[in-house]
Each structure stands twice: as C-alpha cells, then as structure tokens.
C-alpha cells in the first residue's frame, strides 16, 4: 500500500514539474521581450544610433522622448518648426500629462523623431516594426508615406479605425532619418501607441515578426485541437460535461488569440470590421471566464456554492450583452469593472479549492497552482493596462498555462477511470473475445481514418503550395522545387535555366482599369504562360506581385531563348488592351534569363539574381524584350 502511495506522489511531483516547465516556455518569451536590452532612449526627439553595431544588436527599441504636436495633424511637408514638447514612448494618452494637462483617451496628435545612424550600417537594408496603435495612423519616413493603418480623422465621423502591427522595409540613402507619425483615436477608451517601435536590420525584424506569428498560430492550433478533442470525448460520453466546457473554453481562447497580440485575424481577413474585432476581444472574455468557472464547478461539484456562482453568471451575461449591443467607444470603458469581478470570483474559487487541497482531492494541487498563476497574470494586466506597473501583458500566457494544467487534470481523471476499468476487467475475462473483436474493429476504423487523414494532408499540401489568385504554384512551391532540381543537377551535370518574367507597366494598368481587372489579367497571363512552360516539362510559379518564375532543366541556350520568344508571342496573342502602357496598346511582358551549363559554375541564389538583373536590363531597354545572362555576358535578344 505504501508503495502505491509513493508512486502516486512521484507522478504528482512529475506533473507539477511538467506544468512549471510549460509555464516557463509560455511566459519566458513575453518576459524576455518586455526586458529586452536592445533599448536606446531618444532625447529631445533625437535617437542617436551612430554607435550601434547592427550586426550585433540586430534591432533597437525606439523608446524615449519623441516630439509631439497635440491636437495637430501635420504632414512632413508642412512641418516648419521643431517640436518643443516631448513625451516618453510608448505613449498611451488616457491619464497621461502633457504640459501639466491630463489627456483623455480621445484626440489626435503628430509625433516626430529624428534617427541618426552610421553610414556604414546603411549597407544592410533596414526595417521598422510598427506596433499596435490605437486606432488609426500614418507614418512618413524622410517625407515618404510608408504606412497607413485605417483613416486618420480629426473627429469620430471621418476616422476609420484599424489594427495592423507589421514590419516595413526601408530604402535609406542618408544617415539621418526623419520620422513623422500621425495618430488619431475616437473609437475606444485609450488612444496612443501601445507597444515599442523597433528599428534594425530588415532580415532580423521580419524574422522576429514571423516567429511571433508562428508562435501564436502554433498556440491557436493547439487550442483548437484541444477543443475538438474534448468535444469528441463529450460526444462519446455525454456524462463528461467537464470535457464539453473545457472544449468550449479552448475554442473561445483560440478565437480571442486571433484578435490580440500580432492580430492574426487581420492577416486572414484584411477587411474584417474593426468594431467586431474589438467585440470579439471583449466578448470572448465575458463568455470564456464563466465557462471556465462552469468547468471548475463540474470538476469539483461540492466545493463551489451555487448562489455565488449565479451572481457571477448573471453579471457575465449582462456584460456580454452590453459588449454585443454597444460600440467599442462605450464598452471599452467598462473592462476594468469586469476584470475586478473576475479577480474577486477567482479569489473565492481559490479559497474554496484550497479546502479540497487539504482533503487531497485528485488533481487539485495542479488545478490550484494553475488557477493562482492565471489570477496573478489577470491582476498584473489590470495594473499594467491602467499604467500602474510596467511589466507587460501576461493574461494570455496565464490562460494557456491554465488550459495545459486542466488537460493534465483531465488526464489524471481519465487515467483514474481507466485504472478502475482495468481492475474490474480481471473479473470479466470471459468478455475478452468480444473485446478483442472490438479492438480489431477500432483498429480498422483507425486505419481508415489514417488513410483519410493522409488524403486530407495531400490536399492541404496542394493548397498550401498554390497561389490562391492565379492557381499556379506559389513562392513556397518554387523554393522547394528549385532546391530539388538544383541538388539533382549536381549529380547529373545538367544545364539549368531561370526565367524572371514581369508584366510591363502593370501599375499603370491597375490605375487605369482597376485592381479587379488587374487580378483577371494576372490569372490570364499566369495560365497562358504556365500552359506553354509545362509543354517543355518546365516549372512555372508566381514569384510575387506581377512577377513570375520559370525553371528549366537540361535545355540548351538556343532552346531557352526560343521558349522565351514563344512566351512573348503567347501574351501578344491574348490581345489584352492596355492603352496607358508605355510600350504598346496591349499587355506585354519583359523576360530576364539566366542560363548555366552546370550548377558548379554558379551559386544557387546567384542564378536567380542574374535572371533578375537580366529582367532589369529588359525593362531598361524599353520593356517587351528578352535579355539573356550566359557565360558571364548579358545578351539582348
């Protein structure tokens, strides 16, 4: 008996360590970003980075003193005087002081910052990360408009709110960078800049943004899988209401994760309503937390008192309806009230569950620890968003930790149930034959499911490798195919050829006929070129925008030139009108070719680069032409 108790204790300790490890993985990236050492503070509107080695520090947080013109929307062309008032970045408006006057959350302002960098650092392309801005903004770099999120307005009628944290690459030609930022907010409680602007090497910033996005997508995917898995458990066993509530909780948090952080929903649905974006963020909180309490009450039915829970459910229902039927400008002012309700409710829940700890209820230790973590993260965020502390947003991390902990608790519960079944099976050996038959049926079903899953994965791979607009292979498929052909040619010593194709004057076409017509032209041109390339067993893909890519294997230089001329002829035969083209009155293409008789004579990336340079030469020669790079020579066809 004592041996069994020791085994249980070892399992409990192991699961607690597992929970702590998961918590570290989830929270550490947030903490490391909040405590990032790559921070340079601007002084009097100037951020001096001339001593920074971007090869070492990669990117810099642009905090410190930015110049501000409150209640003014000034463009770079009309800004004549230097700012005399400065604020500390990031800068949220509500409650902050400007010239001894406390600001409200609404209004508009223009910010100015000068960045000084070392001329040597300009050899590497730079980029700027734009954080969450509430709720509309415009950004100019050296007088050029590089970013617009929503529509700036001087009142609520002409403002159009939007969220879109993103990275923009910069083409810099001088070491002094003038940054002008306009921000307006008439749509919610707290306007201003919520996160750090980052400046640094483009490659590093793009990689950082992609990693953040991938991390959130990974967590969202995990939550969705958790949710549907527990739905299946509930469907198979209707008495397991805890599994139902847990599944709903996972999906609600997954939904909320789409509209916070990196705001993945704006990537998936760029035209999605900003108002509903905010409603989802607030509404999911008001529904997810009561579902969370329902889950706890189902798991530990005898410990939470129904009258207290009914009061909380009633408050949550009223708040959720309030969020649905009022605009963000109204309901965003009430979140502190509901957060306080959540904290008080969690305090009560933790108090009641601590009684279960004393009675050594299975799973209670893990559940109570995760509940405490979640409560502290929620309390932290209330203090953080009211600017009483400067730590960061941890509620999402706390929720993920809690969900992981609950999956452990459910696993303990189900494991305990399975162990009881195994004990009972000793006295039911006569049912082994039927059980074996059921196992065979289940195995057969699983094999069928695996076949179906494999088929679905194949379909998903096709979709992920195809450009959704033109229905031709995309950049991802291009990279995979190019790597494969390149490695094969190393062994076979075949020639390899790359075409870079660009639709001439396509921006003028869009400006003249509209983007919808432009999309139709992209489809027509892509399909026409793809059909001809596939006739010679070549690979065709969309490279980006109006550019396309052709990969040929084992062709002579004469054959590739003939094919290029045929591709030009194919587009001419389409006779797509383009009256604003600088070439002719129909759509034409320019082609750059890079041909190598062996992969040993040129680097993989260099071949594409040479094709791109050849394309540039075709454009310089007046477009509607073909340029060939072969044997270190550029030949006009």
Image (spheres, grey):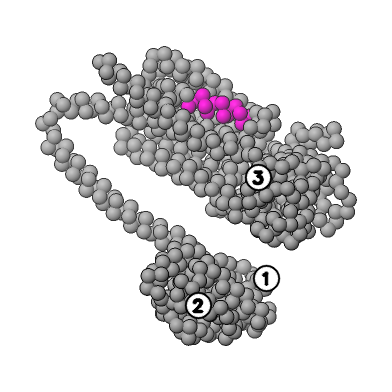
> How far is disc 2 from disc 1 in space, using C-alphas?
35 Å
**CB within 8 Å, label 2 to label 1:** no
Q: Nearer the viewer, mark 3 or mark 2?
A: 2
> How far is disc 3 from disc 2 in space, using C-alphas?
46 Å
Quadrant (top left/top right/bottom left/bottom right) for the N terminus: top left
Sequence order check, earlier mark of 1 and 3: 3
Tell me residue 153's x, y (percent).
76, 50
**Helix, strand or loop at mark 3:** loop
**Helix, strand or loop at mark 1:** helix
Q: Residue at x 63, y 39 (%)?
A: 36
Residue 245 vertical placement versus 183 (above, below): above
Task: Please state if 391 lies on the left or on the right of 314 as rendered.
Answer: right
Q: Tell me the number on the disc at residue 132.
A: 3
Q: Residue at x 51, y 68 (%)?
A: 603
Q: Nearer the viewer, mark 1 or mark 3?
A: 3
Quadrant (top left/top right/bottom left/bottom right) for the C terminus: bottom right
Sort mark 3 into few (<14), some (14-19) or many (20+) by Cα contacts within 10 Å: many
**CB within 8 Å, label 1 to label 3:** no
Overall secondary structure of the magenta stretch?
A: helix
Sort mark 1 into few (<14), some (14-19) or many (20+) by Cα contacts within 10 Å: few
Residue 291 visible in image: no
Residue 569 vertical placement versus 396 (above, below): below
Q: Nearer the viewer, mark 2 or mark 1?
A: 2
Q: Is residue 378 magenta?
A: yes
Per the rendered image, the range of residues in magenta is 370-382
* Pick the front one: 72 or 285: 72
Sequence order check, earlier mark of 3 and 2: 3
Task: Please state if 433 lies on the left or on the right of 18 as rendered.
Answer: left
Tell me residue 510's x, y (percent).
64, 71
Q: Which residue is mark 1?
A: 511
Q: Which residue is mark 2?
A: 595
């Amino acid at each position: 008996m004592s041996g069994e108790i020791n085994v249980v204790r070892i399992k409990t300790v192991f699961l607690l360590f597992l929970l702590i490890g998961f918590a570290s993985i989830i929270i550490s990236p947030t903490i490391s970003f909040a405590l990032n050492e790559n921070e340079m503070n601007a002084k009097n509107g100037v951020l001096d980075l001339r001593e920074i080695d971007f090869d070492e520090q990669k990117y810099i947080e642009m905090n410190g003193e930015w110049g501000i013109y409150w209640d003014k929307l000034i463009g770079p062309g009309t800004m004549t005087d230097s700012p005399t008032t400065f604020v500390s970045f990031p800068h949220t408006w509500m409650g902050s002081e400007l010239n001894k006057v406390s600001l409200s959350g609404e209004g508009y302002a223009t910010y100015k910052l000068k960045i000084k960098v070392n001329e040597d650092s300009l050899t590497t392309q730079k980029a700027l990360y734009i954080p969450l801005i509430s709720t509309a903004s415009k950004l100019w770099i050296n007088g050029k408009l590089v970013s617009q999120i929503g529509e700036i307005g001087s009142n609520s009628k002409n403002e159009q709110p939007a969220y879109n944290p993103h990275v923009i690459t910069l083409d810099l030609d001088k070491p002094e960078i003038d940054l002008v930022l306009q921000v307006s907010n008439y749509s919610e409680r707290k306007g201003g800049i919520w996160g750090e602007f980052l400046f640094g090497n483009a490659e590093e910033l793009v990689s950082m943004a992609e990693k953040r996005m991938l991390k959130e997508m990974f967590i969202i995917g995990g939550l969705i899988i958790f949710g549907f898995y527990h739905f299946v458990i509930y469907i198979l066993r209707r008495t397991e209401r805890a599994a139902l509530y847990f599944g709903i909780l996972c999906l609600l948090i997954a939904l909320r994760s789409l509209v916070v952080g990196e705001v993945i929903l704006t990537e998936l649905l760029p035209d999605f309503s900003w108002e509903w974006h905010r409603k989802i963020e607030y509404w999911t909180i008001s529904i997810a937390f009561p579902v969370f309490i329902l889950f706890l009450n189902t798991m530990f039915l005898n410990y939470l008192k129904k009258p207290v829970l009914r009061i909380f459910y009633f408050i949550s229902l009223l708040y959720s309806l309030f969020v649905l039927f009022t605009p963000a400008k109204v309901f965003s002012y009430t979140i502190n009230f509901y957060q306080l309700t959540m904290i008080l409710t969690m305090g009560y829940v933790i108090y009641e569950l601590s009684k279960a700890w004393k009675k050594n209820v299975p799973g209670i230790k893990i559940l109570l620890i995760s509940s405490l973590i979640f409560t502290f993260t929620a309390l932290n965020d209330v203090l953080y968003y009211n600017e009483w502390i400067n730590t960061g947003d941890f509620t999402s991390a706390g929720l993920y930790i809690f969900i992981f902990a609950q999956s452990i608790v459910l696993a303990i519960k189900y494991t305990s149930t399975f162990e009881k079944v195994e004990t009972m099976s000793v006295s039911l050996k006569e049912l082994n034959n039927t059980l074996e038959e059921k196992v065979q049926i289940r195995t057969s079903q699983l094999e069928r499911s695996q076949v179906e899953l494999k088929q679905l994965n194949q379909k998903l791979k096709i979709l992920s490798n195809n450009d959704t607009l033109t229905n031709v292979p995309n950049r991802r498929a291009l990279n995979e195919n190019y790597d494969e052909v390149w490695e094969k040619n190393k062994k076979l010593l075949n020639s390899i050829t790359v075409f870079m194709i660009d639709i001439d004057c396509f921006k003028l076409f869009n400006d003249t006929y509209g983007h919808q017509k432009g999309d139709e032209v992209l489809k027509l041109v892509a399909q026409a070129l793809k059909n001809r390339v596939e006739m010679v067993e070549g690979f065709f893909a969309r490279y980006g925008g109006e550019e396309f890519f052709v990969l040929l294997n084992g062709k002579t230089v004469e054959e590739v030139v003939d094919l290029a001329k045929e591709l030009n002829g194919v587009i001419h035969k389409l006779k797509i009108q383009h009256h604003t083209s600088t070439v002719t009155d129909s759509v034409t293409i320019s082609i750059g070719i890079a041909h190598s008789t062996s992969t040993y004579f040129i680097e993989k990336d260099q071949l594409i680069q040479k094709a791109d340079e050849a394309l540039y030469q075709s454009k310089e020669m007046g477009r509607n032409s073909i340029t060939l790079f072969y044997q270190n020579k550029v030949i006009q066809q």
